Structure formats: structure tokens, C-alpha cells
Amino acid sequence: MAKDPRYSVQFRRKREGRTNYGKRLKILRAKLPRFVARKSNKYITIQIIEFSANGDKTLATAHSSELKEMGWNHGMKNIPAAYLTGMIAAKKAAGKKIKNAIMDIGSYAPSKGMKLFAALKGAVDGGLEIAYDSKILPDEKRLSGQHIADFLKKPEIVQSFNQIKNKLLGK
């Protein structure tokens, strides 16, 4: 440990590599709720979070395990599941009268076509307004699960995707 009087200890979350405070400050300056998308080994979680001086407030949460109740019997962490979870989050946000948000992918390195951007596309198609560049999104075949259906020879993945998507859109 340094003994210099000018030495200051960094915040714990910065030391652990969990929070980039420069990036967080830029996102918070937008004064919009954050569309926070995270992936784990099994699931996709999406939260819409609003900044508060006393601590951030979670306004809406969607979890890919909610797809089971809608008839989704496939993977919970793939691109179609992320897209549908994004649509669920947008539907819950509309119920709370949230129209705009800003994307927050945290410490994940952004790459074209990643699952978190599929969730973004689902939220935008569900009615949430989020600024993005269309070049980062996965193509339509990947969003619908066609690439999985072709590989596993299971066309029911695309069918159940379309059923749940239409149910979420109210068709």
C-alpha cells in the first residue's frame, strides 16, 4: 500500500473491475432510464433502471425464464430468447408508462450481433424507444432462431418463436 499523502484508494467496485464510473456518468447524463441487459450461464435478464441519489430504482424486470409460461420449451440464453425477453421488458415498461431508455451493457465488450443486442431489438420492436445503430443487430434469421432450427433440424423453434412474438405484439 502506498504511503504517499496524495495517494487515494479507488472505489471498491472500480478496483474489482465491476463498474466503469466514466461510462456510467455518461449514461446517467442522458437523464433517461437505463435498459440494462445482462446474460448469465443459463438466462438473460433485462431491467429498466432509473437513477436516484439514494440508489438506483428498478422500474421493470424481465427474465428469460418467463418464456416457459408462454410456451417456450427451448434454450433460455440463446438469441431468440433474448429477443423475446426484450419484448417482454418493453411490454412491462409500457405498463409503467416508460417510453424512452438508453442501452447499458455494462462491462461486456460490444460485438456485432451479440445476444444483448438481440434483446435491444426485441425491446425496440416491443415499442420502447432506444437509440442504436442498425449495423450492430443480429440478422432476422438469427433473431427468429432459424440458424438453430437448421443446425438441430427442429423447425418447431421458429414456430414457437413466431407464436410467442405474435402473442406479445397482441396479434
Image (cartoon, rainbow, N blue to C red):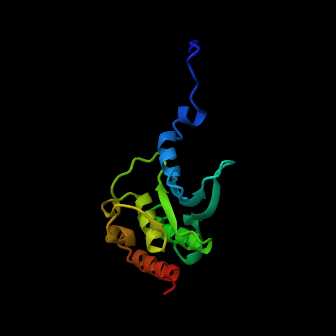
Note whether 75 is above or below 22 in the view shown: below
Name the quadrant of the N terminus. Answer: top right
User: Which one is nearer the viewer's eye here, 75 or 35?
Assistant: 35
Note whether 50 is above or below 14 in the view shown: below
Q: Residue furthest top?
A: 3
Q: Residue furthest bottom?
A: 171
Q: Residue at x 49, y 48 (%)?
A: 106
Find residue 33 and report its horizontal and vertical position in percent: 55, 59
Find residue 41 and report its horizontal and vertical position in percent: 51, 53
Find residue 5 and report its horizontal and vertical position in percent: 59, 14
Q: Residue at x 65, y 56 (%)?
A: 57
Find residue 28 and report its horizontal and vertical position in percent: 53, 50
Can residue 102 be seen at all in this image of the molecule? yes
User: Which one is nearer the viewer's eye here, 96 or 139?
Assistant: 96
Q: Quadrant of residue 116?
A: bottom left
Compared across the picture, whether 150 is left or right of 54 comes to: left
Q: Residue at x 56, y 19 (%)?
A: 7
Note whether 95 is above or below 35 in the view shown: below
Compared across the picture, whether 131 is left or right of 25 comes to: left
User: Which one is nearer the viewer's eye here, 116 or 23?
Assistant: 23
Can residue 147 be seen at all in this image of the molecule? no
- The total number of labels drawn is 0
Q: Residue at x 50, y 71 (%)?
A: 87
